[in-house]
Image (spheres, coloured by chain):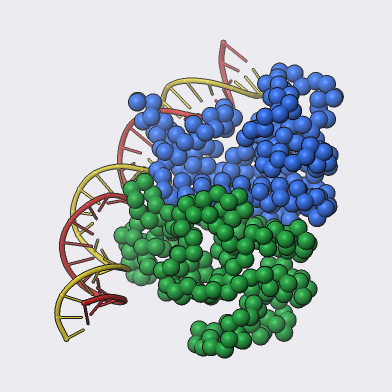
Chain colours: A blue, B green, C red, D yellow
Amino acid sequence: MFVIGSRIYKRVVLNFTTKNRNITTKKYRMKTEILEIYIQSVLPMKIEIAEKIASKFDRFELSKNEFILQENSISEDTYFLESGFVRSYTFDNNGNEVTTNIFSAPCFVNDFLSFFTQKPVKENYQTLSNCIFWKTNLENVQYNFHNIPEFREFSRLLFIINYYKLHDRMLEMVKENATLRYTKLLEKHPNIFQNASLKIIASYLGITDSSLSRIRKEISKI
Amino acid sequence: MFVIGSRIYKRVVLNFTTKNRNITTKKYRMKTEILEIYIQSVLPMKIEIAEKIASKFDRFELSKNEFILQENSISEDTYFLESGFVRSYTFDNNGNEVTTNIFSAPCFVNDFLSFFTQKPVKENYQTLSNCIFWKTNLENVQYNFHNIPEFREFSRLLFIINYYKLHDRMLEMVKENATLRYTKLLEKHPNIFQNASLKIIASYLGITDSSLSRIRKEISKI
DNA sequence: AAAACTTCTTGTCATTTGACAAGAAATTAA
DNA sequence: TTAATTTCTTGTCAAATGACAAGAAGTTTT
């Protein structure tokens, strides 16, 4: 993700490695550096412009198991997840929770449809760990979208990236069996396993928790 | 889809109902009306603006089983499907075709990732029937995107709509069994069944053609 | 530490779906 | 019209997954 070979990059990497141990100074807390780096990783642009975009975001924290968005509410804000894990879920016809997405920082966590069309959210977005978020509202996004060409390009790329993530997941569901989907997730996002229960992961993979348990047993034999 | 209660709406509906019988006059052939109406159905705007956007599109036709885009090529254009049916497909690990999407006019048929990032297309886009398309290139899209605010909003909405279509399909794959997915498709897009083989539909639903055949048998009993 | 609760595993059995092959039906080509 | 080809159905059996229940392991609360 962070393929920018710049001074700033190194500075932020330092923050990343130390942030879990001691986030103390007010100075650090208010910095949008990680958001700026994330923006640059999607679409490189002049530092001042990334700063300008990031300046419209406000920081907030949530602890584990809190909700960012709940079913039937309207998404007033759009969210950048600086650190932590989030999942979205809904319910199947038997009332079982189905995890629709798992987000691991840094990334945007949004319900685009609700945010841009002001229709009700259809899923629940819940933290899986303590999280640091940055949010901004539709007015700010609209201003940037229509006044900062780089932001427009950035937004579009973000959509494309999200679309193809979903697309790939869809293809995995159709083309690959549960075992392969599991091992791929384990390989690509091992840290998710420290933050989500196997039940959550199973429903994200489209199987039951007992099936996942058996798959894990099979794999551990090898 | 076409929820615009205007004179133009009625005019085009007439065109829709008659178009299969006789598309003859050159005058008709060159008209972007259906594209304009489609744009308006996504985001209502002044007629002149929709006309301006549409004016950058060029018309072309393909007959059944031709390719719009092929794996590993770069998408030079973006396509609006005025009439006909298209599917995209790729191959699974055993070399079997997997239909990833079925498009039924009017709609846009794009590989966003390739078109906007100029990376290779990962799927094949093939017509399922004779088709009428309109295409425009990246330069035109970029000009409109940065100079026509309504086009920006339209593009974003188009992304959102496509994203949530995919999202809903993903949820269907996880939450519902093959029988329900089949009956839903049959109900929502019965015309697809006149244009795609059951093998194509089966792989779109994520099952084999023999399974689909058995599902159809079960349903016909009722 | 004990109790209550959650998470994970395992057993049993049913259901769904897939793999493969053969044949029927429909379509296309000669 | 006949032959060739494709599409669809069906049979048989295997594999994957689900439903449900019970118990083990781990956490949290009291």
Task: Left or right? Give the position of B138 relative to B199.
Answer: right
Q: Is residue D5 above or below residue A182?
A: below
**Closest to the observer, A7 or B86:** A7
Task: Give residue A214's position: percent from left, percent from top.
Answer: 39, 33
Q: Is residue B10 above or below residue A167?
A: below
Query: Is residue B201 something that shows in the picture?
Result: yes
Task: Give residue A44's position: percent from left, percent from top.
Answer: 71, 40
Q: Quadrant of the N terminus of chain A?
A: top right
Task: Left or right? Give the position of A77 relative to A167.
Answer: right
Quadrant of residue B197 in the image? Answer: bottom left
Quadrant of residue B112 in the image? Answer: bottom right
Residue for point 62% across, 38% down: A103
Q: Is residue B11 above or below residue A143?
A: below
Residue for point 67% across, 41% down: A42
Task: Give residue A67's position: percent from left, percent from top.
Answer: 70, 40
Q: How many marks?
A: 0
Task: Give residue A215's position: percent from left, percent from top.
Answer: 40, 34
**Closest to the observer, A1 or A173:** A1
Task: Left or right? Give the position of A167 relative to A174.
Answer: right
**Closest to the observer, B148 or A13:** B148
Query: Is residue B102 something that shows in the picture?
Result: no
Residue for point 52% across, 37% down: A201
Residue for point 58% across, 66% down: B79
Q: Quadrant of the C terminus of chain A?
A: top left
